[in-house]
Image: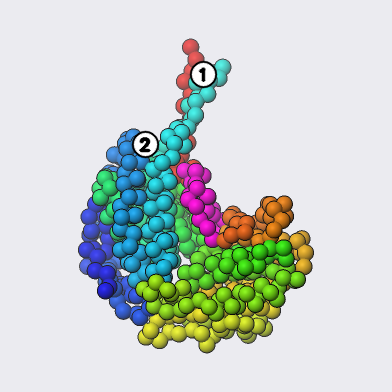
Amino acid sequence: MYPHQPEGSHFVEGAYRDDREGTPFQSCFPADGRVIARLHVATPAILDHAIHSAQNAQAIWRTTSLSERQQVLRRVAEILRDRNDELARLETFDTGKPISETLVSDPASAAECFEYYSALSPTALQGSTEQTDTGTIKVLKEPLGVCVGIGAWNYPIQIAGWKAAPALLCGNAMIFKPSETTPLSALKLAEIIAEAGAPAGLFNVVQGDGKVGQWLVEHPGVAKVSLTGSVATGKKIHAAATAQLKHVSLELGGKSPLIVFDDADLEAAVEGAAAGNFYSSGQICSNCTRIYVQRSAFDRFLELFIARAESMKMGDPLDPETEIGPLVSEHHAESVRTYIELGLSEGATCVSGGPNSVSMAADGTYVRPTIFTDVREAMRIAREEIFGPVACVMMFDTEEEVIGRANATELGLAAGIYTGDNGRAERVAHQLQAGICWINTYNEYPIAMPFGGYKQSGLGRENGLLVLDHYTQTKSILTQSR
């Protein structure tokens, strides 16, 4: 059974809204292409309403005590957990991700985020007081105002939750624009936040493409922009926002390395590599699509990795046994297929999967896990983010060599290390140019861990205590001694 048509395309000032003057668009189930919802792009009237209601709600919310804000966030987490199954099913219909994933990693991650910030000690936002010869210095952390969140299509409700929870905790309002490819679950989150007791307009959702995002970024009533998206989009958003000296956070792409030393538990390393390449059909920004394996372990690792990839069940994302669902759209599946063919033309060897494993027929947009060897760093498949289930496995000899190769990229979101030597793990992690490093695991995201990258993988961080600095501004008050 398909989800019901949403009550409106947008959620503004505590209620569903629509304006049929907006350009129509639709959300389709990637497994079979059928339309599951029809919506409209936000018109200027909807956008103005979103801005004004957010400003009004924020004026109330900023004076609300921290404990009261946390009570609302705690209630949001409770409702998300209560409705986890229906929200997971909606996310599967919208994204095509297997229900086995969405049940444990999508609304659940958003709930974990709201719960984490609802339980923080008040000292996290208290600032400081210091007595000096001149007088008393108070340093306060105050909200920014109205923030804009712009989401990606791969983890819609998780990304919305990761942006909303800390922003609201700090006393801000947020207007969230989900990807037009996966527009539905953010509406449900907005509904839940309103139900939990937030002022009407505190978290608004408006739909649309890049033009809507650009309008929001450039609006003088917006103080902060937080984007999850591509490097190209991030550069455009950054230029537009910083032209007005607005606060900006960017969580962008990656081409992350996984380093497997010959003393590693190879079976565990293979599971990490599979999770870091094939989970969500490879549509995760932090994926370890460059796998470096030390020479003496290479053949055994590759044997195990191929076997693991070929054992993964591909099929109906609503089947609890399915591990590989469809890619999000025909357009994206075609992009991934083009990269697979490019890898072959560049001289890489496809040892599993390949171009013939792509289906873009009426039964969905599926790509089997694909593994390349004989890959050189100069190849595009080793340099560019493919965002599909395509892994490059390469051989190395020394620690120094692999660190240099791992860092030879303009991106720096994440990295992984598998080794039995704790000293080496720490030593290598400190030398990798990546914002996130996992040791003997991969793609785990506890909310307490800041998430974000180096270099062109972005600016700022999501999650943890550090994100509070990105949703507040500092005020210093000096009271002169008498």
Q: Nearer the viewer, mark 1 or mark 2?
A: 2
Amino acid type, mark 1: Gly
Determine the residue positioned at 50% across, 69% down: 279
Q: Is residue 296 visible?
A: yes
Spot occupied by residue 203 in the image (x, y as percentages of width and height): 32, 51
Q: Residues within 10 Å of mark 2 (few under 14, many from 20)?
A: some
Mark number for residue 135?
Answer: 1
- Write down the quadrant of residue 352 in the picture: bottom right
Q: Decide whether the magenta segment is chiefly helix, strand or loop.
A: loop
Q: Which residues lie in the magenta part?
A: 443-468
Closer to the chain start, of discs 1 and 2, is: 2
Q: CA distance from mark 1 to mark 2?
A: 28 Å
Spot occupied by residue 195 in the image (x, y as percentages of width and height): 25, 50
Determine the residue positioned at 46% across, 33% down: 123
Where disc 2 sits, the SS reads helix
Q: Residues within 10 Å of mark 1 (few under 14, many from 20)?
A: some
Does residue 192 appear left or right of residue 225 in this picture?
Answer: left
Does residue 167 appear left or right of residue 341 in this picture?
Answer: left
Spot occupied by residue 13 in the image (x, y as percentages of width and height): 25, 51
- Relative to 159, residue 326 above or below: below
User: Which of the pair 185/1 is nearer the observer?
Assistant: 1
Mark number for residue 78?
Answer: none
* Residue under pointer 2: 66
Residue 461 belongs to the span the image colors magenta: yes
